[in-house]
């Protein structure tokens, strides 16, 4: 394109676009942001807005589209949500004062991880930008929320740990070095599964020295040891890259980012990605909704800051007993002070999002109404601080001491800003009467100008005796005195002639000129002065960012503990004991989410006892739909709630601190990555067996069901042996299974105990009692469950016939004999191989001399067969087998 043929404005547009080639350029023209050429085509398509054209010196009109300046945030957000970056080129000088083209500059670049607009951000969630650096086989991870000032850094060694951190923070944008792109991490999974924008930055962002330098300069320290970063060599590079990226996109000093928090993943309970999903901590598995999650149950917070902090507590339960007890004691004291707690909630209710407000104030994007919202919030602080002063628990006293009532800032806003100001900062009406003398004078000039002119006219009439003297105005001459020709001889010397008309003369005086200057310039000067005064007030507040952020964190903490307390008292939760002996004892425990979702039914409570000794592993049997999965998830959630400092849904609980919770619950094909149900299941089991410790809690549901019966039984058996062996693992485990043969392991493998879901039989029907009792189930009640599920009666009847025939063949009893014969003598002896089993105790096929039936069975692809196909095949093979037996007498 020949730029010389473009108009000067379009030449500047193209020069700016060249500086930001990877961004859509929002170019401010009057009351609109305009886009041209390729950007216009993209925005028109993505936002479905009208595409027009503009003459710019070329043969063809340039494609053009635009969005209104006042509504730009929503358009910006929609583009950013679709993965685009947007550069905003703003007018940086007053068009009235500009000589030639109005000066425009890119004032910031908006990306998914750097959005600050309150209109588009979810106030209950942080909007994280994550930097990942891969160096020498280690990942440095830095996570920042530019809207609140949170800034974190850590390091991990494996892909799985990396994905766990990504899952924990759910960043909206990831920036990384090229080595991360080449590390083998599945970037498509990152982008698609986590809905995150991923981009590699230029190598200059990741220089070790430049990263160290930018961190030291930003936090004003001589060495990074003062920030606690000395042990995070790779993390330092990630943090430095994130900080440089934020500088580059925000064109700001980022003064509200006042601290960086290094952490080790071992400081908190480790909850891997599949466990977060299975336990539905902050979003449901299918609908990805909050309703139906643990967060939904516990979140009765009143402020956005509290909601975000509670989410982080759920994501990162504690593993230090003292820290857990401090939180428990705070919740307990609030429980015992019901009236004070409710009063606190009343005062918390009007508190706005102080963290994001101070972020916008520091960014200089806060408007007058933001400051009024800020003042409304600050007015509540003295009352909250007074009530907190009544409490004795250590944590609440700490929060009280950290809560600065910020009365000076509240008074400043109250004295300076109108109670109901406009949203924009350029139209006046912002500053209160009495705050600034010159502003008051200009305001009076604007409103009282007519009165002053009338008084001057009256005085001059009296002084000169000219009865029809008038003060008039037009755009050419401004204000003037008009005197008709009949009185022109009475005009005094200090009147200066401005214009002669046919029948009148027009004059001015020094006093009239002064009034004219005051009146005509007052409005413009007042708007300009009010803007300057507003900016001064905003900057004054921004200078107190440390005090405000500390107070915001304290308010968030108070809000979280009030929420946990309110839920505990309303739901009848109890304070759990916390032990470090590995004992997990729950009496009448309930599932916190399921019991709240139930409307017409009472939840059946259940006991749990696990330890590191004789009750390490519970094998739980019982039919589908009876409540095994609910029960096991319930135990995991109670442990997690206890370790985040909450009370728990039980009659009594003694919780041994767990370093990790692992779950393998449910099965679903991972079609996106081409993995079958069984492959996903085995991958997760492998992860659990490799990473669990003696202090972990394992929740395993139906291990081995994705393959053939004997393979599945063998795998489940071997997994139980491995987990229960104190030499190999010895973790506390809940193991639900359909393989009733595994109940034979109690008494054979130390630490294994049998439990089952109680079922009441009523003829051909069953009733699920949903009660966990000692002992193993010897029936699956599959046909009864099928009937409950609504399977047609004809299929149920045929299934009963086949079941009776199979029972006559005594297949299950034979399989049990195999299990008993092959049961290991010690807890760590391997399960016999199938060929060894055949040598010791031949299967029911040993009566068949011809092996064509066995070959046909071996060749069946069970994973692709429908239940009806399987029944028909089994019936045909059984008939064939019976005929053989008849032939052999």
Image: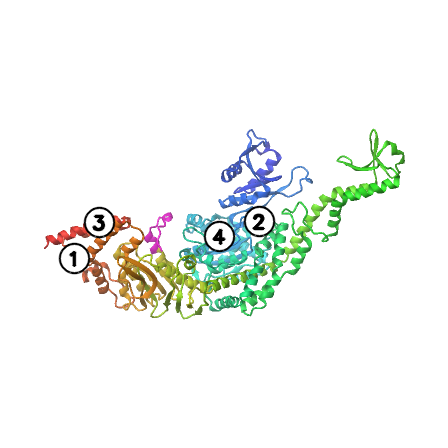
Closer to viewer: mark 1 or mark 2 = 1
Note whether residue 672 is visible.
yes
The circle drawn on residue 250 is 2
Judging depth in this view, the residue of 325 and 200 nearest the camera is 325
The circle drawn on residue 396 is none
**Which secondary structure, mark 2?**
helix
Residue most extreme to the right: 489
Q: CA distance from mark 4 to mark 1?
A: 59 Å
Q: CA distance from mark 1 to mark 2?
A: 77 Å
Magenta segment = 666-682
Judging depth in this view, the residue of 169 and 790 nearest the camera is 790
For the residues labelled 3 and 4, say whether their Cβ atoms are less than 8 Å apart.
no
Label 3 sits on residue: 873
Indicate the position of residue 137 as horizontal and vertical percent values. 43, 56
Query: Which of the marked residues, 1 or 2, is nearer the chain's N terminus?
Result: 2
Query: Which of the marked residues, 4 or 1, is nearer the chain's N terminus?
Result: 4
Closer to viewer: mark 2 or mark 4 = 4
Query: Which of the marked residues, 1 or 3, is nearer the chain's N terminus?
Result: 1
Q: CA distance from mark 2 to mark 4?
A: 18 Å
Query: Which of the marked residues, 2 or 3, is nearer the chain's N terminus?
Result: 2
Number of other residues with Cα within 10 Å of mark 4, as a class: few under 14, some 14 to 19, many 20 or more: many
**Which secondary structure, mark 3?**
helix
Label 1 sits on residue: 846
Query: Which of the marked residues, 3 or 4, is nearer the chain's N terminus?
Result: 4
Label 4 sits on residue: 171
Residue 563 higher or lower than 791, as above or below: below
Q: CA distance from mark 1 to mark 3?
A: 20 Å
Q: How many marks?
A: 4
Judge whether residue 679 is colored magenta: yes
């Amino acid at each position: 394109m020949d730029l010389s043929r473009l108009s000067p404005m379009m030449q500047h547009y193209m020069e700016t676009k060249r500086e930001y080639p990877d961004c859509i350029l929002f170019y401010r023209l009057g009351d609109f942001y305009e886009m041209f050429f390729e950007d216009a085509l993209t925005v028109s398509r993505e936002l479905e807005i009208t595409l027009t054209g503009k003459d710019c010196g070329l043969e063809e009109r340039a494609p053009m589209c635009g969005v209104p300046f006042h509504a730009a945030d929503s358009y910006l957000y929609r583009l950013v949500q679709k993965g685009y970056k947007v550069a905003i080129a703003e007018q940086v000088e007053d068009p009235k004062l500009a000589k030639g083209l109005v000066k425009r500059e890119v004032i910031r670049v908006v990306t998914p991880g750097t959005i600050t607009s309150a209109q588009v951000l979810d106030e209950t969630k942080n909007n994280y930008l994550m930097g990942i650096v891969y160096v020498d086989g280690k990942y440095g991870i830095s996570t920042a929320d530019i809207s609140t000032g949170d800034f974190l850094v850590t390091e991990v060694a494996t892909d799985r740990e990396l994905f766990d951190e990504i899952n924990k923070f759910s960043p909206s944008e990831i920036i990384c070095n090229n080595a991360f792109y080449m590390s083998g991490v599945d970037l498509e999974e990152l982008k698609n599964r986590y809905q995150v924008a991923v981009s590699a930055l230029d190598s200059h962002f990741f220089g070790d020295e430049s990263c160290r330098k930018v961190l030291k300069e930003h936090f004003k320290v001589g060495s990074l040891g003062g920030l606690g970063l000395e042990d995070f060599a790779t993390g330092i590079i990630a943090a430095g890259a994130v900080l440089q990226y934020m500088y580059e996109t925000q064109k700001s000093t980022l003064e509200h980012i006042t601290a960086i928090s290094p952490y080790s993943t071992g400081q908190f309970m480790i909850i891997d990605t599949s466990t977060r999903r299975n336990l539905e901590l902050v979003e449901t598995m299918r609908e990805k909704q909050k309703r139906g999650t643990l967060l939904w149950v516990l979140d009765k917070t009143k402020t956005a800051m509290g909601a975000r902090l509670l989410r982080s507590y759920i994501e990162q339960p504690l593993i230090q007993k003292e820290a857990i007890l401090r939180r428990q004691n705070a919740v307990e004291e609030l429980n015992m002070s019901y009236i004070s707690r409710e009063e606190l909630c009343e005062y918390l209710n009007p508190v706005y999002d102080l963290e994001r407000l101070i972020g916008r104030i520091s960014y200089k994007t806060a408007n007058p109404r933001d400051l009024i919202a800020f003042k409304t919030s600050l007015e509540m602080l003295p009352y909250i601080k007074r009530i907190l002063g009544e409490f004795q628990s250590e944590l609440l006293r700490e929060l009280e001491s950290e809560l600065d009532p910020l009365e000076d800032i509240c008074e400043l806003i109250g004295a300076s800003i109108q109670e109901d100001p406009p949203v924009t900062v350029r139209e006046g009406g912002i500053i209160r009467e009495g705050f600034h003398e010159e502003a008051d004078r200009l305001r009076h000039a604007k409103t009282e100008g007519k009165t002053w002119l009338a008084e001057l006219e009256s005085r001059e009439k009296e002084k000169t005796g000219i009865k029809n003297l008038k003060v008039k105005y037009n755009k050419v001459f401004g204000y003037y005195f008009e005197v008709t020709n009949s009185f022109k001889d009475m005009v005094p010397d200090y009147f200066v002639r401005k214009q002669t008309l046919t029948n009148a003369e027009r004059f001015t005086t020094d006093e009239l000129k002064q009034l004219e200057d005051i009146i005509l310039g007052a409005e413009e000067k007042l708007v300009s002065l009010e803007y300057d005064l507003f900016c001064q007030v905003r900057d004054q507040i921004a200078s107190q960012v440390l005090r405000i952020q500390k107070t915001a964190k304290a308010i968030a903490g108070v809000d979280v503990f009030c929420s946990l307390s309110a839920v505990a008292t309303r739901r009848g939760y109890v304070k759990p004991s916390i032990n470090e002996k590995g004992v997990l004892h729950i009496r009448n425990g309930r599932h916190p989410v399921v019991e709240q979702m139930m409307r017409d039914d009472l939840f059946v409570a259940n006991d749990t006892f696990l330890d590191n000794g004789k009750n390490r592993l519970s094998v739980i049997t019982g039919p589908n739909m009876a409540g095994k999965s609910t029960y096991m998830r319930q135990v995991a959630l109670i442990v997690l709630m206890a370790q985040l400092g909450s009370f728990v849904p039980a009659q009594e609980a003694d919780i041994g601190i767990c370093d990790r919770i692992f779950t393998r619950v449910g099965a679903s094909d991972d079609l996106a990555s081409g993995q079958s149900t069984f492959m996903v299941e085995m991958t997760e089991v492998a992860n659990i067996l490799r990473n669990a410790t003696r202090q972990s809690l394992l929740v395993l549901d139906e291990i081995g069901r994705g393959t053939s019966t004997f393979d599945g039984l063998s795998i489940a058996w071997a997994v139980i042996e491995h987990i229960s062996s104190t030499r190999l693992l010895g973790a506390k485990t809940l193991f639900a299974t359909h393989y009733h043969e595994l109940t034979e392991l109690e008494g054979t493998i130390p630490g294994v105990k049998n439990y089952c879901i109680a079922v009441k039989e009523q003829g051909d029907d069953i009733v699920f009692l949903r009660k966990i009792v000692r002992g193993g189930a010897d029936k699956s009640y599959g046909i009864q469950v099928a009937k409950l599920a609504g399977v047609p009666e004809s299929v149920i009847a045929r299934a009963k016939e086949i079941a009776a025939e199979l029972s006559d063949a005594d297949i299950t009893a034979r399989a049990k004999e195999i299990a008993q014969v092959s049961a290991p003598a010690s807890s760590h002896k391997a399960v016999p191989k199938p060929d060894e089993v055949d040598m010791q105790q031949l299967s029911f096929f040993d009566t068949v001399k011809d092996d064509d039936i066995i070959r046909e069975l071996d060749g069946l692809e069970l994973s692709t067969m429908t239940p009806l196909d399987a029944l028909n095949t089994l019936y045909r093979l059984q008939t064939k087998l019976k005929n053989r037996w008849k032939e052999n007498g």
